Amino acid sequence: ETGVTQTPRHLVMGMTNKKSLKCEQHLGHNAMYWYKQSAKKPLELMFVYSLEERVENNSVPSRFSPECPNSSHLFLHLHTLQPEDSALYLCASSQDLGGRVNTEAFFGQGTRLTVV
Amino acid sequence: AQSVTQLDSHVSVSEGTPVLLRCNYSSSYSPSLFWYVQHPNKGLQLLLKYTSAATLVKGINGFEAEFKKSETSFHLTKPSAHMSDAAEYFCVVSDISSSNTGKLIFGQGTTLQVKP
């Protein structure tokens, strides 16, 4: 148990559906991240939030929409996804942005998303 | 730009024999380096980290890694493999570029198989 909780663990959605992934941490961390893990590819950083402000958006399609209402919660809103978006979506948090302070990231167990 | 290369996509060892997972990095700065482990259908767990202190870093579950600047390497070792060590292992470098966005650069991963 890392202190980062993701729900749901598994999600199957159609291409016309709208769904949301939730991430929660009570570690007192200031930074939160969304990563995408596809088969046979390195982890891809999608979004970075620091103190509830988005600091990076790695050219992610607009069908993925992040939301960070407070420092403990992070959402990823999904709409009109494509089958190639099927992947494991991982949330992580760190005390601060790794560039400023050398801190590690704590990962949730991920949401396995299947788009049909 | 920083990057990390894991030299083996698959490593197979027998239980009780040593483990060596190889990682080379490229960095213009003094890097922070990490090893994470991912068991099937689970999130990533930090094994150990190097942040410019001792070059030999000890982690959990008997793993350790040595930072060698001259070789730009950060190989992960364990004296005696256990069946429960079978998992995916990721070498990670922290991007400490001027943007300070805390980006973790992941290697492609190495699958460790442990045979009885």
Image: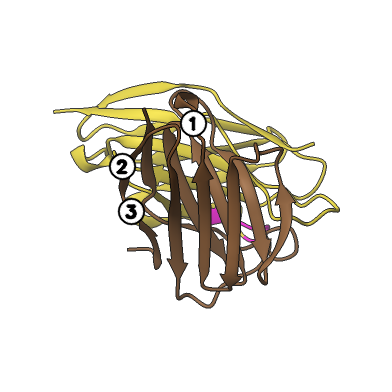
Chain colours: A brown, B yellow
Picture layout, residue A97 above or below residue B31? below
Inspect the image, locate mark 1, and give the three-letter code of the amino acid beneath it: Asp
The local secondary structure at tag 3 comes to loop
Work out whether disc 3 and disc 1 sit on a shared chain: yes
Corner quadrant of residue A89: top left
B52 is within the stretch colored magenta:
yes
Corner quadrant of residue A49: bottom right
Camera-nearest residue between A1 and A16? A16
Measured as percent of width and height from the top left, residue B96 is found at 76, 52
- Identify the residue position indicated by label 2 in the image: B39
- Identify the residue position indicated by label 3 in the image: A8
Measured as percent of width and height from the top left, residue B110 is found at 43, 29
Residue at image coords 28%, 25%: B13
Measured as percent of width and height from the top left, residue B102 is found at 69, 55
Inspect the image, locate mark 3, and give the three-letter code of the amino acid beneath it: Pro
Camera-nearest residue between B75 and A61? A61
Numbered mark located on residue B111 in the image: none
Measured as percent of width and height from the top left, residue A2 is found at 38, 63
Residue at image coords 38%, 39%: A113
A69 left or right, relative to A11: right
Numbered mark located on residue A85 in the image: 1
Chain of the residue under the numbered disc 1 shown in the image: A
Picture layout, residue B101 above or below residue A61? below
Work out whether disc 1 and disc 2 sit on a shared chain: no
Q: Which contiguous range is marked in magenta?
A: B49-53
Disc 3 to disc 2, C-alpha distance: 18 Å
B52 left or right, relative to A71: right
Please tell me whether mark 3 or mark 2 is closer to you in this view: 3
The local secondary structure at tag 1 comes to helix
